């Protein structure tokens, strides 16, 4: 029996939750793929892109900035974020992540427990990672 799961950015399924969204997700691990109760994605924010304001009842949401820069806002507090920064949002906080940089913003985003995030992402429209996305995520 295989005791691990493996994914490459190039083969990860990617989705945009709704057509007007300015961010999209490449799924690395979730319940549908791996049977676990968390989700790990690469979240990609277009220039000027942002999440809608949101909060989670039980879930902690962790962001690690892989490339780019932005601002995290949680319950009215702002924190600039850039490559190499880690941010943990606690349950109940109303938060937004905004790309304020000149290029795309890439984060490793992990939510534990999943709290329906995987299902929400997978209900969206499939998208393809472009050449720039793959170059950033593959370290080219």
Image (cartoon, rainbow, N blue to C red):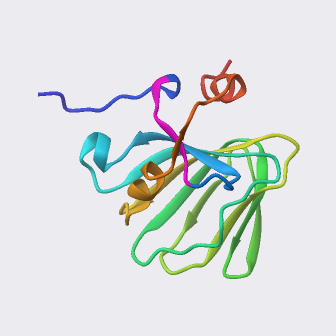
Q: Position of residue 44 (x, y in %)?
A: 65, 44
Q: Position of residue 54 (x, y in %)?
A: 58, 73
Magenta residues (range): 11-17
Q: Nearer the viewer, residue 132 or 64?
A: 132
The residue that appears at 67% across and 68% down in the rendered structure is: 96
Instruction: Indicate left or right for 102 with 42 as reference.
Output: right
Quadrant of the snapshot with the C terminus: top right
Q: Position of residue 48 (x, y in %)?
A: 82, 53
Q: Is residue 74 magenta?
A: no
Which of the 4 image quadrants contains residue 76? bottom right
Quadrant of the snapshot with the N terminus: top left
Residue 129 to residue 16: above or below: above
Instruction: Report the residue that reaches farthest toward the left.
Output: 1
The residue that appears at 50% across and 50% down in the rendered structure is: 124
Which of the 4 image quadrants contains residue 128? top right
The residue that appears at 75% across and 67% down in the rendered structure is: 79
Which of the 4 image quadrants contains residue 119? bottom left
Q: Position of residue 19 (x, y in %)?
A: 64, 52
Instruction: Report the residue that reaches farthest toward the top.
Output: 140
The residue that appears at 77% across and 72% down in the rendered structure is: 78
Q: Nearer the viewer, residue 11 or 17?
A: 17
């Amino acid at each position: 029996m295989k005791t691990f799961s493996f994914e490459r950015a190039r083969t990860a399924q990617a989705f945009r939750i709704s057509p007007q969204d300015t961010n999209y997700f490449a799924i690395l691990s979730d319940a549908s793929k791996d049977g676990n109760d968390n989700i790990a994605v690469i979240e990609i924010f277009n220039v000027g892109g942002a999440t809608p304001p949101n909060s989670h009842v039980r879930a902690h949401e962790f962001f690690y900035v892989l490339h780019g820069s932005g601002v995290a806002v949680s319950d009215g507090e702002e924190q600039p974020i850039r490559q190499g920064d880690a941010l943990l949002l606690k349950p109940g906080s109303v938060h937004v992540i905004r790309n304020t940089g000149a290029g795309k913003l890439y984060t490793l985003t992990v939510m534990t427990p999943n709290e329906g995030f995987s299902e929400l992402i997978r209900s969206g429209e499939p998208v393809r990672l472009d050449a720039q996305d793959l170059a950033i995520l593959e370290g080219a």
